[in-house]
Amino acid sequence: MPIVETTLQPCPMAGFRIQINQAWRLLLTFSLYQLLLGGLLLLLFLSPWGPSLLGRFSPQLFGITAVCYTFIVFFSFPFIFLRRPGYIWQAGLHVLLDIVALPVIIYACGGLESGFGILLAVSITAAGLLIGGQCAVAFAALASIVILTVEVYADLSHDFATTHYSYAGMLGVTYFAIALLAIALARMAEQSEALALQRGKDLAYQRQLNEFIIQNLQSGIIVLDSEQTILLSNDSARRLLGLSGQPTGLADLPTQLRNHLSEWPQNSQELSATIAMGDAAPLHIRFNRLLIQNIPLTMIYLEDDSLHQKRIQEGKLASLGRLTAGIAHEIRNPLGAISHAAQLLAENNHLDPQDQRLTNIICNQVRRLDDTIGNVLQLSRRNAAHREKVCLNSWLETFCQEFRNETANEYDPLELDISDSKMNAWSDPSHLKQILSNLCHNALKYGPGKDGRIRLQLVRNEEGRPCIEVIDHGPGIPQDQIEQVFEPFFTTSPTGTGLGLYISRELAQLNQASLQYHNGPDGSRFSIILADADQVTVQL
């Protein structure tokens, strides 16, 4: 599709540009001025009450010039409306017509002492506004030369009693000054128009962006004016209200919504309510009053009540989580005292085997409870992920070496399988280490192979993302319990807390990774699917 130019450059020797429509309007205005000037000169010349200086030196020359000038301007209007020939030609010819005709009129009226030299100043101003740049200065120079030529001709012909060379020179200077001033004003007007145009584009872009955001909000929004006319409604409002089209007034809205709006007290700034929508889910509605530029508006927010209740529940869970963390911290102090007392009691040599067994039970259960409290505190104090680019090939080798040192087994507990291709991932190394350590400890606890080892391998999944797999050789998790494996406090071990896998999954999600479980033919397989750092784009 061809690009349509909206501006033109009237002077080829300058960078001044003007809007096309504005340029033709200015030319039409100047042509009307020329027509009015020519008609007025003719009317005053032919009228017996006109000034005597019109055509004082040569009435015939004055009359012919005024008639030709007026008719040329009159017959130029069709060309202006048709815009043929181009703007530059027409604007230049109109200014040139004044530079040729007005000096002849000045000569016919007796020279510069008639005072008509000032009329060329208007023409030079028009040249600065219509054409601008060096072209306007050239027209000013041409007008100065023509005026000076008239004076020289009159002096050599002895047509006038006196000549006015100094006045001609002052007029020439005036023409140049007016041309330069007109150029400056035209440039300022061009800059102002360009700024206004750019701001108009910015406002249009901002309006389109706001409309896009409003239309794609999950919540419904309806804006009413003081006359209860709907000024704005998005697609979510139409969908939530079950309307076939966009509402235009209150009559298009459900009766329950209108009733709540009519019962809204005038002295109340906000109102919330829940309305039933037949077979559809209930809606949570919220009314709010706004005053924008002294115009009262009513905002109606619509939301699926289930989502509203979910947000409320999330807030309650967050508060409950903070309360749980505080309780867990307070429990730890008396728990430490119980553990210390049980250890001291176990050191008593006079205890019979039955009491010794009871003290061991106390110590074991205290240790288990302390692990649970530690996991709860770790979950509540979880720090944000500080992701960085990690080379998984070298990082896994380092991790395996550190894990071997921590376990201090006589045999190597890990069988590492790394592909030849280099893989980089976006992840927090401390979080990744915590996840992998937890998975490896669980695998060694529940499913080591005949040689007491588990397998750790680095591969790419079907989507091409880096994937770390922890594979054991145990019996696996029963099929009916797989969906619960990542739930908090779910465990199949009498000594487990049920928080390890839950915390691991939460840490993985913090790093935009996913933790998945699959039952294999010879055991369990946990997969950590990470964000690929070698891709150009990274999810945020």
Image (tube, rainbow, N blue to C red):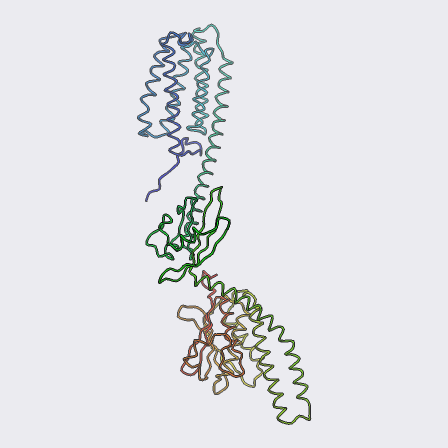
Quadrant of residue 410 within the rendered picture: bottom right
Residue 16 vertical position relative to residue 376 in the rendered view, above or below: above
Quadrant of residue 495 within the rendered picture: bottom right
- Image quadrant holding the N terminus, namely top left
Q: Position of residue 45 (x, y in %)?
A: 37, 10
**Residue 350 placement, left or right of 117:** right
Q: Position of residue 243 (x, y in %)?
A: 34, 55
Give the total of numbered labels. 0
Q: Residue at x 60, y 70 (%)?
A: 326
Q: Residue at x 43, y 43 (%)?
A: 201
Residue 22 vertical position relative to residue 406 in the rendered view, above or below: above
Q: Position of residue 39 (x, y in %)?
A: 36, 16
Q: Position of residue 344 (x, y in %)?
A: 68, 86
Q: Please name whichever residue, 319 or 33, is drawn nearer the observer in this view of the structure.
A: 319
Q: Please name whichever residue, 303 or 200, is drawn nearer the observer in this view of the structure.
A: 303
Quadrant of residue 46 within the rendered picture: top left
Residue 464 vertical position relative to residue 522 in the rendered view, above or below: above
Q: Please name whichever residue, 96 or 268, is drawn nearer the observer in this view of the structure.
A: 268
